[in-house]
Image: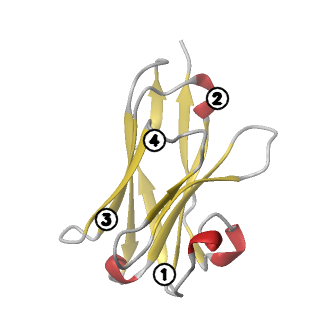
């Protein structure tokens, strides 16, 4: 069992930045593929970005490409999601998810490919 804790959510003006963190309890994150998903009010949860455990291969949703960046700090056993130039449509609950299974690129954005999920962090973008 892997327990994930997201942190860093909050409120930001349009054009602003936030950084989310995802840290597991009792496991080494470097061996897991990590994905970020989000769910906006009244909408289904959607893929944001994923990073493979080995080689650091990443996949971004088109809506965040060029604005969001996923990174991993193995020494801190933490994955970060840096969100820049945020817009009101980025308002959502953001979830961190992991799997120890080796995923292929086409699987990174599939929610069912991930085994463990965090409880989510609220991010609100408004003026």
Q: Position of residue 69 (x, y in %)?
A: 39, 47
Which of 61 and 2 lies nearest the eye of the viewer? 61
Q: Residues within 10 Å of mark 2 (few under 14, many from 20)?
A: few
Q: Residues within 10 Å of mark 1 (few under 14, many from 20)?
A: some
Cα gap from disc 4 to disc 1, whole angstroms: 21 Å
* Residue 74 found in image quarter: bottom left
Mark with earlier residue (3, 1): 1
Instruction: Look at 80% across and 43% down and name the residue there.
Output: 43
Cα gap from disc 3 to disc 1, whole angstroms: 14 Å
Position of residue 24 relative to residue 39, above or below, is: below
Which of 79 and 50 lies nearest the eye of the viewer? 50
Cα gap from disc 3 to disc 2, whole angstroms: 26 Å
Q: Report the mark closest to the observer, 1 or 2.
A: 2
Judging from the image, what secondary structure is the residue with disc 2 in?
helix
The single residue placed furthest to the left in the displayed view is 75
Residue that numbered label 3 is attached to: 78
Position of residue 110 relative to residue 31, above or below, is: above
Judging from the image, what secondary structure is the residue with disc 1 in?
loop
Residue that numbered label 4 is attached to: 9
Q: Report the mark closest to the observer, 4 or 3.
A: 3
Mark with earlier residue (4, 1): 1
Q: Residues within 10 Å of mark 4 (few under 14, many from 20)?
A: some
Instruction: Look at 38% across and 76% down and name the residue there.
Output: 25
Name the mark on residue 76.
none
* Residue 70 found in image quarter: bottom left
Judging from the image, what secondary structure is the residue with disc 3 in?
strand
Mark with earlier residue (4, 2): 4
Q: Report the mark closest to the observer, 3 or 1.
A: 3
What is the image's colouring? secondary structure
Mark with earlier residue (1, 2): 1
Residue that numbered label 1 is attached to: 2
């Amino acid at each position: 069992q892997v327990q994930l804790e997201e942190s860093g959510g909050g409120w930001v003006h349009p054009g602003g930045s936030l950084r989310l963190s995802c840290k597991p309890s009792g496991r080494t994150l470097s061996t897991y593929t990590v994905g970020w998903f989000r769910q906006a009010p009244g909408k289904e949860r959607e893929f944001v970005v994923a990073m493979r455990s080995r080689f650091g291969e990443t996949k971004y949703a088109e809506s965040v490409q060029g604005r969001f960046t996923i990174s991993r700090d193995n020494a801190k056993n933490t994955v970060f999601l840096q969100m820049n130039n945020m817009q009101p449509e980025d308002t959502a609950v953001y979830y961190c998810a992991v799997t120890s299974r080796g995923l292929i690129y086409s699987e990174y954005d599939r929610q069912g490919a991930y085994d463990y999920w965090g409880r989510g962090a609220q991010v609100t973008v408004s003026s």
